[in-house]
Structures are given as structure tokens and as C-alpha cells.
Image: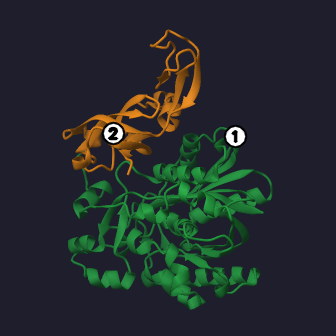
Chain colours: A green, B orange
Amino acid sequence: MAGIIGYGAYMPRNRIKVEEIAKVWGADAPSYKRGLMLQEKSVPSPDQDVITMSVEATKHALTRAEIDPSKIGAVYVGSESHPYAVKPSGTVLAEAIGATPEVHCADFEFACKAGSEAMFVCMGLVDSEKIEYGLAVGADTSQGAPSDALEYSAAAGAASFVIGRDPGVAKVIETYSFMTDTPDFWRRSYMHYPRHAGRFTGEPAYFKHIMGCAKGIMAKVKMEPKDFAYVVFHQPNGKFPQRVGKMLGFTKEQIDPGWLSPTLGNTYSGSSPMGLTATLDVAKPGDMVLMVSYGSGAGSDGFVFEVTDRIDEVRNVAPGTRELLDKKTYIEYGTYAKYRRKIRMGE
Amino acid sequence: MSTSAKYWRGIPQRYRLEAEKCTDCGAQFFPPRVVCSGCGGREFEEIKLDDRGKLLTYTVIRVGPSEFCEQTPYAMGIVELEGGVRMTGQIADVDFDDLEVGLPIKIEFRKIREEGEAGILCYGYKFVPDK
């Protein structure tokens, strides 16, 4: 049976508050904060991207996994903001951790669920005994167009998982996917910013797919919300994961440990995976954890994990997700615009 | 002109901090050398440098090259890693008021530069405060 052998997260130190963005565009900050349940978001420095964050998150995952990186047989990075259009982010990651050259490598893309895709595929390869260990990363430095609602949430972060066979820190009890063609959010070739379908991104997109996936996987394992210690949903803002959790019958106490978006923002492919790393930071042996990702376009991957005794041995050997979240430096909109290359420079 | 070949040759050092240790006198070298400057030995074992150390000296660049204009002002420093190797690099994520000799440092993987709009992206190590 496949399991998570090691896990790690990483996020930039820069933060920008909702008030700072709203001030520039003449928007009403309190209504954004109340409506989206967002306070601030992470912002990458000019020298940080999906590749650098993936490497740092993976260093933490390998510290917890305590394995020889050369035994990793697959490196998959899921993102919608890969630095290269052609050249896999995973090539740099695999080289940086010493996993080359006998390793399969690919970049995945499925809006915000590219990271859970990487996890899903690694688990299948481990279960089929094609590889001993696989590395699955979800990372993004996504952008929202200036003044668009997405600008208040599009953030940066990464989560990395070493997937292998037992014993790990969490056994994979079940996986499940729920996917349809739903054009709620997209970015065409050569376009800098994504487009979205406004309120259509809610009920027929996020809520339908997360509900469908959560109900489907719980039926598969014959479990109910009360059987789980924790649940993690994709977090495009602060409001949606709390709302979908309530609709499914989960309590705030089950959701809150992995609910990072109010002070982190939406880290896209890193979102639910980082929620999982934060949850593993506090989980106890024997706890059951449900994770359901969501990627626009649209689909959800569901995972049921059972936390093992090893969590207590490795939890504190690398930085915790909320420990990283607490290290921050606030920046103004001008610095944010410079860092995110929203200013047209001379040629 | 692309510097792919030059960049590629430095990957073991830039990405993984691979260094060498003289098998005769134990001196560590980064990047690797052919002859030990301590004892003249020519036999080395490959080692991986520790990713933590302390700041020996620093300066703040306020007028940088044009390709670093997004990061100006930024700090540069010489760090001595545990094991004795000294290396030069950029100090990221630091408040300049916190810069002081002896500051604990750890190494992070960062983008060093871009070869223009269409060239390769060059990655490597930078220093960040270890706190």
C-alpha cells in the first residue's frame, strides 16, 4: 500500500494585505475581507518561482522521509506557473536533490489540482511497484490581473510529498477522481493573466466537483464526515472551503488546522497539498484525514489517509507549515507590482 | 549568446553544493580543485557542504547591474559554512538592520539570473538569515 513517507511545505516571506490592494483600486477592503474571508496573501520575490519553492519544500520532505534521493523513481511537479513553457520544472528539481539520472520526470497542469494529480500518479506507480519512491509537488506563483478579484487571492507556495510503500507517516487508504468539462477558469496560450467566469466558478464548478468527489470517496470507503479527524479542501479563498465543509457535514474543528488561505491566499496547485502538510503537522497516529483538491476546468482528486505512528518521529525535524506562515514581511503595492512584473520597463 | 554549457558545468556546485576534501590534509574546496593549496595533494573525496554557516562580512548594493534592478538594493556577503568553506553570494530575505558579522545563515535555492526574456533561467544558492 502506498503512503506518504515525507512531506514539506515552503512559501515566500513577503505578504500583502487586502487593504493595500484595495486602496490602489478604490475597492472596499472590508467587503472583500468579509466576503472572501481573506486578510493577506504571500508574494514571491523576484528570485523565487515554482522551481525554487519546489526545491525548498522537497528539502523539508526529504528531511522527514530520511531516504536516499537516488532511489526516487519519479519526479512530478504540478503547477500552472511553470517558469519554462518548454523544459520541465522537474528536471531542475530532480537535479537539485540528487535524484538524476535514473528517474522519470514530467510536469503536470490542471489549474489548481496539478499537485494532487502528481500525488495521484505517484501513488499508482508505487502501488504497481514500478517505482520504490515518487516525488509529488504542487507549487504555484499564480497571478491575478490588476484590480481583478483574483488579485486579492492569487498567492505563492509549494508542498512536496515523498510517496512510497509502508511504513510512512500516512497510509493512502483510497483515492478517487471526479471530473467534467466545465469552463469556469482558463488561460489561453500566450496570455499573461487567466480569465474566469465570475460566479459560475462557484456552484457548478468548485462546489459540484468537491461535493461529488468527497461523497464519492466516502462512499467507496464506507465512511462519514464524523469518521475523520481532519478534512482539507482546495482553498481559492477563505470562504469556499468552510462553506463546502459545512455543506458536507464537517465541523470547523475538522477544517481549521489545514485552513491556510485567510493569511496565505490561494496557492493554486499548492493549496490543498499545503493544507495537508499543515494538517499532518498536528495529526496524531490513527487519525483519518480526507483531502479533496479542485482544479478549474474542472475536477477534484480525493484521498483518504490514515496517519501512522511515525508522524511523531518526523513532525518536528523540518519546519512546520504554520511556522513558515508566521515568518513574514509586509510589502506595499508598489513593491508587489515590481516583484510581480506588473510594471512596463524600458527596453 | 547562450551560456548553457557554462551554466550546466556548474550544476553540481550551484544546486547541490558538491565540494572536495583533500584526503591528505582534510582541507575542503569549493569549487573543486586539481591540487590542494594546503599540502599539494592531488587525491580528493567528494563531499556535500553543510547548508548552514555564519556571515563573515557583507555589503549592500544600491546601484546594481540593470538585470538586478528588481532586487536593488540587495545585500552580498561572504559566509563561512560549518566545515570551513567560505563562499560569496547574495543575502536574500534580510532586513538590512539585521545584517551583522556572525549572523547565522542558511542556504536556499533561488533563481540567480535570467538570460533576458527568452534565455535560460539560472538557479543556484543564496543566503538567508537562519532564524
Q: Which element is circle 1 on?
A: loop
- Residue B111: x %, y % from top left: 41, 44
Q: Residues within 10 Å of mark 2 (few under 14, many from 20)?
A: many
- Looking at the rendered image, the disc whose residue lies closer to the viewer, 1 or 2, is 2
Q: Is B75 placed above or below A51 here?
A: above
* Left or right of B91, for residue A305: right
Q: Which element is circle 2 on?
A: strand
Q: Is A288 placed above or below A199 here?
A: above
The residue at which mark 1 appears reads as A102
Locate the N terminus of chain A and report the quarter of the image it occupies.
bottom right
Locate the C terminus of chain A and report the quarter of the image it occupies.
top left
* Left or right of A221, for residue A261: left
On the image, which quarter does residue A30 sit in? bottom left
Q: Is A188 placed above or below B83 here?
A: below
Question: In the image, which disc is placed on residue B88?
Answer: none
Residue A205 seen from this side: no
The residue at which mark 2 appears reads as B90
Residue closest to the eye, A148 or A277 = A277
User: Marks 2 and 1: in contact by CB < 8 Å?
Assistant: no
Q: Determine the CA span between mark 1 and mark 2.
A: 33 Å
Q: Residue at x 58, y 26 (%)?
A: B46
Residue A57 seen from this side: yes
Extreme residue toward the left, this view:
B63
Q: Residue at x 64, y 86 (%)?
A: A225
- Residue A10: x %, y % from top left: 47, 57
Q: Amino acid at mark 2?
A: Gln
Give me the chain letter of mark 1: A
Q: Amino acid at mark 1?
A: Glu
Residue closest to the eye, A55 or A87 = A55
Give me the chain letter of mark 2: B
- Residue A67: x %, y % from top left: 66, 47
